[in-house]
Image (cartoon, coloured by chain):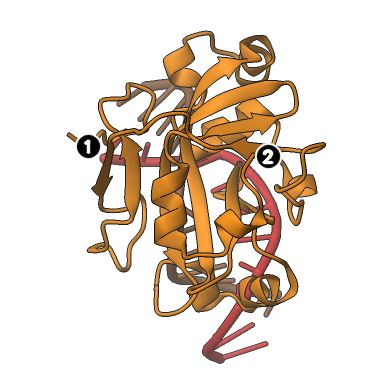
Chain colours: A orange, B red, C brown
Amino acid sequence: MLTREFFQTDPVTCARKLVGATLVWGESRSLIAETEAYGAIGDEACHTWSRPSARAFVENHPAGTAYVYFNYGMHWMLNVLVKGRKDGFVLFRALEPLSGLESMHLARGVKDPLQLCSGPGKLARALGVTGADHGRDLCHPDGPHFMAAEKKVNVVSAPRVGISRAQELPWRFCLKGCLHVSKPRPK
DNA sequence: TTCGTGATAGAG
DNA sequence: TCTATCACGAAG
């Protein structure tokens, strides 16, 4: 299991290394197919840039805490707090479901495994992530947690999706060739 | 391509 | 109070 130390490096390192790891959430297990890094300092696309509440969150919580927020009036976004050499967040953008597919079908209303978690809003919906999970510790075996990648994986980096500032940073990380990643799919 | 939907924050 | 903005997704 990934312990708190894993989240005490920096957001880009964490985002890259989380691709290929497994997310255990309730009764479900999923392979992490896509992430993005956000830097608390100097990153105009990060919430900390414009939101005092996000800066306070970084101050008041340890590495490995869930940062969940509601966007566009309808989507929950799941992130994990990173605090170490550099502070920031990792956004989970896509998963490949491994188990617990039935409850995901139910929550999402679609059956195609490729459509279940291929986007940050979709995966939160599929897992049942809500504001109630904001501030939750993701480093405890009794709750949601992560398992390290079992073997070496190929990761491709690309510009982040859906942001209007700091678009040049290649801080999106995808499992190479994985059909479960969100659009636009990198090559 | 468009539009729904709501929290947040800054301006007035 | 009012308004802009937003790390999206489904429908058309």
Whether residue A154 sits left or right of residue A105 in the image: it is: left
Outermost residue toward the front? A151
- Chain ID, mark 2: A
Question: How dense is the environment of label 2, judged by Cα within 10 Å: few (below 14), some, or many (20 and up)?
Answer: many
Looking at the figure, which quarter contains the N terminus of chain A? top right
Give the label, 2 or 1, closer to the camera: 2
**Residue B8 location in percent, x, y?**
66, 69
Residue visible at 50% across and 50% down in the picture: A91
Nearer the N terminus, badge 2 or badge 1?
2
From the image, tell me which residue sits under label 2.
A145
Residue visible at 34% across and 45% down in the picture: A173
Whether residue A120 sits left or right of residue A66 in the image: it is: left
Question: In the drawing, what numbered circle is on residue A125?
Answer: none
Residue visible at 67% across and 22% down in the picture: A28
Marks 2,1: beta carbons within 8 A: no
Note whether A5 is above or below A149 in the view shown.
Answer: below
**Residue A72 location in percent, x, y?**
54, 49
Question: How dense is the environment of label 1, judged by Cα within 10 Å: few (below 14), some, or many (20 and up)?
Answer: some
| Nearer to me, C10 or C7 | C7
| Nearer to me, A178 or A130 | A178
Note whether A71 is above or below A181 in the view shown.
Answer: below
Question: In the drawing, what numbered circle is on residue A186?
Answer: 1
